[in-house]
Image: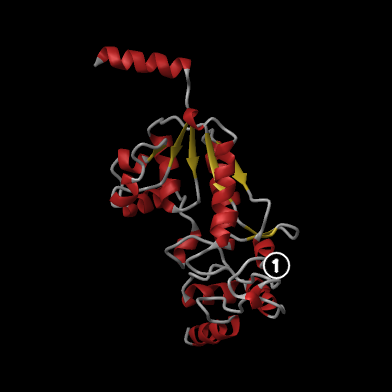
Amino acid sequence: MELIKIKNDIFDLLFPKTYICSWSGGKDSTASIILAHENNEPLDKIVMSEVMFDKKRNISGELPEHINWVYSIAIPEFEEWGYQVEIVKSEKDYLDLFYGVCKKSKYIERIGKYHGFVVGGKCAANRDLKIKPITDYYKKMNIADVIQYVGIAIDEPKRLKRLNGTNKVSLLEKYKFTEQQAYELCKKYNLLSPSYEFTKRGGCWFCPNQTNEELAHLKKYHPELWEELKILSKEKNLVSYGFKYGKTIEQVENKINKILEGR
């Protein structure tokens, strides 16, 4: 066993790995960074993919409370620990997807119209604006030389099983952390995103998968962003005017207004 360890150490010296944490700002990936810091795990870079709503006006697609915390609290802390943080963004933004022209469809009447709001459960924004920039980032590197830290807790066995045979490693699994323990670790370090005060999930403020209560929070505290969605809903020539699983912005607003009136 000792001989094997020596051989592995020599191999690592000759062919060093690059350790990167894929960070969303959520509790699990943030806790992974904290665990690396606490246990002197190798970590060369922290990479986050930021979704943009409108790049020209610099309007982020991330929840405002969350992205403000990312830039003003979390990144400075990680840099203080000596870590390099890199934010990657897609060349496209949400408006590019919204105003993308439908060129192929089995429904002829849709061809030539704008795609409109992203479809819940088939989110083009997650695919093109969130995942693709990270995928493109790793494509520029020799993936064989990279170890990715991912935030998957020990109470997510199905997700952990998918890591087998990949270059992805969970420090939460290594140190036997559940999702709740990851949450508590972030609180301990004052590195818990404020978005957890009103939602259990991360995501974009225009996401149709949000609950009506979460959308009510958006309208109340960020009316300018809600107005952006209302402006888009009045655009002509859309494939669909459904914002939330077939419900229009007006229909959703009627529901969230009742929520706000009851508070």
Q: Is residue 142 above or below residue 27?
A: above
Q: Is residue 111 left or right of residue 199?
A: right
Q: Is residue 55 left or right of residue 140?
A: right
Q: Which residue is mark 1?
A: 99
Instruction: Judge by depth and name the residue closer to the eye, 79 or 212.
Output: 212
Instruction: Judge by depth and name the residue closer to the eye, 137 or 101.
Output: 101
x, y (%) of residue 73?
Answer: 56, 49
Query: What is the count of numbered marks?
Result: 1
User: Farthest left residue?
Assistant: 1
How has the structure been colored for display?
secondary structure
At x 46%, y 53%, the residue is: 26
Find residue 61 and report its image quarter: bottom right
x, y (%) of residue 234?
Answer: 69, 80
Q: Is residue 124 above or below residue 47?
A: below
At x 41%, y 30%, the residue is: 40
Look at the numbered disc 1 and give the secondary structure of its residue. Answer: loop
> Quadrant location of the N terminus?
top left
Find residue 65 and report its image quarter: bottom right
Instruction: Judge by depth and name the residue closer to the eye, 190 or 246.
Output: 246
One can see residue 229 in this view: no
User: Farthest right residue?
Assistant: 56
Q: Residues within 10 Å of mark 1 (few under 14, many from 20)?
A: some
At x 47%, y 15%, the residue is: 14
Give the residue type that dot 1 points to.
Answer: Tyr
Instruction: Judge by depth and name the residue closer to the eye, 209 or 69.
Output: 209
x, y (%) of residue 156?
Answer: 31, 52
One can see residue 234 in this view: yes
Find residue 63 and report its image quarter: bottom right
